[in-house]
Image (cartoon, helix red, strand yellow):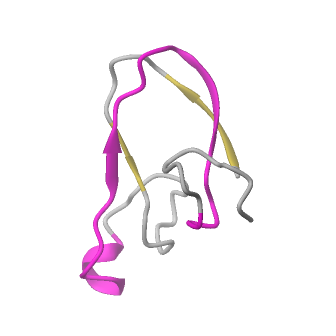
Amino acid sequence: PFPVELKAGKTYGWCACGHSKRQPFCDGAHKKEAPGLSPLRFTPTEDGPAWLCGCKQTRTPPYCDGSH
């Protein structure tokens, strides 16, 4: 998982395809590398640290649930 600091009310794009060079966030690589996928947009309700999934197997995207 990727440790990140999130801001409440800000919208983030979590990379769902695994090709982004800005993991765990989307950089648009899916458009070429995985055209059938798109990022998961999410807006946290609280400021603070979070663990975002890197393996893309989580059942609670974008947050890591230990599936790896």
Residue 25 versus residue 33 in the image, above or below: above
Q: Quadrant of residue 10?
A: top left
Residue 52 versus residue 23 in the image, above or below: above
Residue 64 coordinates in the image, percent (x, y): 64, 48
Residue 61 versus residue 33 in the image, above or below: above
Q: In which quarter of the image is residue 66?
A: bottom right
Residue 7 versus residue 55 in the image, above or below: above
Q: Does the magenta stretch include residue 42?
A: yes
Q: Give the range drawn in magenta.
A: 29-57
Residue 5 coordinates in the image, percent (x, y): 60, 27
Quadrant in the picture for the C terminus: bottom right
**Figure label count:** 0
Task: Please state if 45 lies on the left or on the right of 64 as rendered.
Answer: left
Task: Please state if 66 lies on the left or on the right of 32 as rendered.
Answer: right
Q: Which residue is drawn at 57% across and 44% down?
A: 63
Residue located farthest toward the front when viewing the structure as drawn: 59
Foreground pick, 21 / 16: 16
Task: Please state if 46 lies on the left or on the right of 29 as rendered.
Answer: right
Q: Which residue is drawn at 33% across and 83% down?
A: 34
Foreground pick, 33 / 68: 68
Q: Which residue is drawn at 43% across and 72% down?
A: 17
Residue 39 coordinates in the image, percent (x, y): 33, 59
Residue 53 coordinates in the image, percent (x, y): 61, 54
Task: Please state if 66 lies on the left or on the right of 56 as rendered.
Answer: right
Q: Quadrant of residue 3?
A: top right
Q: Residue at x 34, y 53 (%)?
A: 40
